[in-house]
Amino acid sequence: MPQNDALAAFWMPFTANRQFQAAPRLLSRAEGMYYWGDDGREILDATAGLWCVNAGHGRTEITTAIAEQTRRLDFAPTFQMGHPLAFAYAERLVRMLPAPLKRVFFTNSGSEAVDTALKIARAYHFVRGEAQHTIFIGRERAYHGVGFGGLSVGGLPNNREAFGPLLEAEHLPHTLDQERNSFARGLPAFGAERADALEALIATLGAERIAAVIIEPVAGSAGVIVPPVGYLQRLRNICDRHGLLLIFDEVITGFGRLGTPFAADYFGVIPDMLTTAKGLTNGAVPMGAVFVGDQIFQAFMKGPEERIELFHGYTYSGHPLACAAGMATLDIYERESLLTRGAHVAPLFEDAVHSLRGLPLVRDIRNLGLMAAIELEPRPNAVGARGYDAQVQALQRGLLVRAAGDTIALSPPLIVEGTHLDRIIQTLRDVLRHLA
């Protein structure tokens, strides 16, 4: 396949680079609910960029805040010193969170947030004199980023196979049960008992060896796998019974995706730590964060006050531009009630996506809040090919969707209106009929 020399230098992430260079797909600008391609075509964004542009593209308040912050203070270290905006932003975030989560550790991405949470979990046990707590419990089909920690607890084999030995981790079974729950609207009725697999792992490994359990409340990257009714509550109860830390990875579900600020609010289940990124700055500046329960933080605040309590951090932790973007993003979320708007739009969204049931190739449909998946019948001996073709065909028709294997994932910006949903669904109808 010939190489496009103008595109050769950038080794693209999670991309078939040679295939892309043969038929590039380039976005040149964005505003509101839309991208525009380098050919000038308007493209409706049905994925909030990559699950992150919750308030829509090109928000003037955010770009202005970033520009002003660049002129005032472009960078400041946060090792043994700081800048006021990082503290102000952390304080504002804490006010949004369930009460036990009172501390914020800033990172630069969801992957870094997950690895940070895992390190905090191990260090928490270490400072309490229980360093034998080293094993992590993840879940099949989970995505927790691309750091070695996230790969270890993640459950997507393709992401792991090339990278050799990882951290010691075991995995709970996933909760996708298409025999009993296909075409479920919202929370599936069956499957809460799958949480009991944690009891079996505890019996085998010993609670005294487990550092933490980490899950996505709703698995996004694997194709919007929604937890059954009562599943998360059951996990929380098991963790409490055995004294285990529970981490929620809310990189996708955080900041309004389910119609509540966080999935923890939606389900009424409070983790010991919560990771986030994406919607933290509306995708405008890379940033992640770990929200930490105060009991964990206080365990580190022992010994001489001049001693560094946690030997961990990043050059850009609490970067001034990211904090400025985050503060402006929170202003928009609050002013436009975007963190709860999804609850009002979700019924319309649900009806729209489930109207695709019965179309050619549609194997299952799943949804919760403003997340949905349309799973397609795979081609024989070509898993993922049909999903990729659907993504390309949709883009050619002016619609950006995301393919996860043979599943089309939808996560539109929280500003989505009924007219946008009509266009999304009609375009997908056209794509599915074309592929059939």
Image (spheres, rainbow, N blue to C red):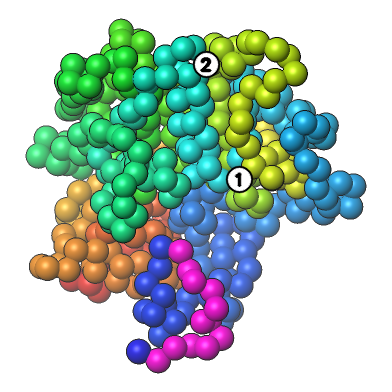
Q: Earlier in the sequence, mark 2 or mark 1?
A: 1
* Residue located farthest toward the top when viewing the structure as drawn: 241
Q: Give the camera-side residue of 148 and 229.
A: 148
Secondary structure mostly taken by the magenta-highlighted segment of the chain: loop
Is residue 10 one of those drawn in magenta?
A: yes
Regarding residue 196, the answer to whether it shows in the image is no
Left or right, 323 with respect to 348, comes to: right
Quadrant of the drawing holding the C terminus? bottom left
Viewer-side label of 2, 1: 2
- In magenta, the rendered stretch is 2-13
Residue 425 vertical position relative to residue 277 in the rendered view, above or below: below
Q: Secondary structure at mark 2?
A: helix
* Residue located farthest toward the bottom when viewing the structure as drawn: 2
Quadrant of the drawing holding the N terminus? bottom left
| Amino acid residing under circle 1 | Asn
Residue on which the image places disc 1: 108
Residue on which the image places disc 2: 127
Q: Position of residue 80 (x, y in %)?
A: 77, 31
Q: How far apart are the alpha carbons under marks 2 and 1? A: 26 Å
Q: Secondary structure at mark 1?
A: loop
